[in-house]
Image (cartoon, helix red, strand yellow):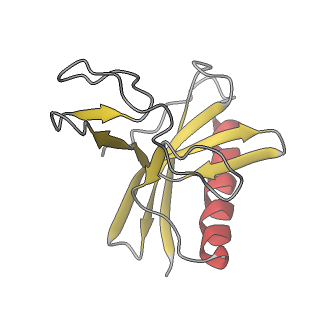
Amino acid sequence: MEISEVRVKLVENKDERLKAFCSITMDGEFVVRDIKIIEGSSGLFVAMPSRKMSDHCPDCGAKNSLRARYCSGCGKKLQEDRTKKDSAGRSKLHADIAHPINSECRDKIQDAILKAYHEEVERAKHPDYEPVDLDS
């Protein structure tokens, strides 16, 4: 797999941890959008696109956020802890939509994205800077 293009859109401090959104093109044929670049406690890291997980009310079947305390359909109180836990014991509230299968692939993607991010940060320092359009 070759990462043929990385596009980075810097974020202006809505959330101090979120630094940018990006998309990558692989082999000039496949695009993954909505990848986030986040400032963590030990530096920048890449978060793959994800969706919020949900479940269904056991009584009425309505779809509910895993953080919901009451059903959005019937109003019944929902069970307190309905989330699955990750290996560190944290509640799993999001599921990756796309993600690398092994650490070598993750490193390859993250290295390419962070390199492009640092280049975009440098370009943004110039007065004639035009932000990247991720949708084109």
Name the image quarter holding residue 14: top right
Query: Which residue is outermost to the right?
Result: 42
Residue 113's place in the image compared with 10, above or below, is: below
Query: Foreground residue, 101 or 124?
Result: 101
Query: Foreground residue, 36 or 53?
Result: 53
Q: Position of residue 71 (x, y in %)?
A: 27, 24
Query: Foreground residue, 80 or 6?
Result: 80
Q: Position of residue 49 (x, y in %)?
A: 45, 50
**At 64% from the left edge and 71% from the top edge, which residue is drawn?**
108
Q: Does residue 29 appear left or right of residue 84 in this picture? A: left
Name the image quarter holding residue 51: top left
Residue 49's place in the image compared with 126, above or below, is: below
Name the image quarter holding residue 20: top right
Q: Position of residue 3 (x, y in %)?
A: 51, 71
Q: Does residue 76 appear left or right of residue 6 in this picture? A: left
**At 49% from the left edge and 64% from the top edge, which residue is drawn?**
99
**At 68% from the left edge and 50% from the top edge, which residue is drawn?**
89
Residue 39's place in the image compared with 77, above or below, is: below
Q: Position of residue 25 (x, y in %)?
A: 42, 64
Number of numbered discs present? 0
**At 58% from the left edge and 21% from the top edge, which residue is drawn?**
12
Residue 5's place in the image compared with 94, above or below, is: below
Q: Does residue 14 appear left or right of residue 39 in this picture? A: left
Q: Does residue 100 appear left or right of residue 97 in this picture? A: right
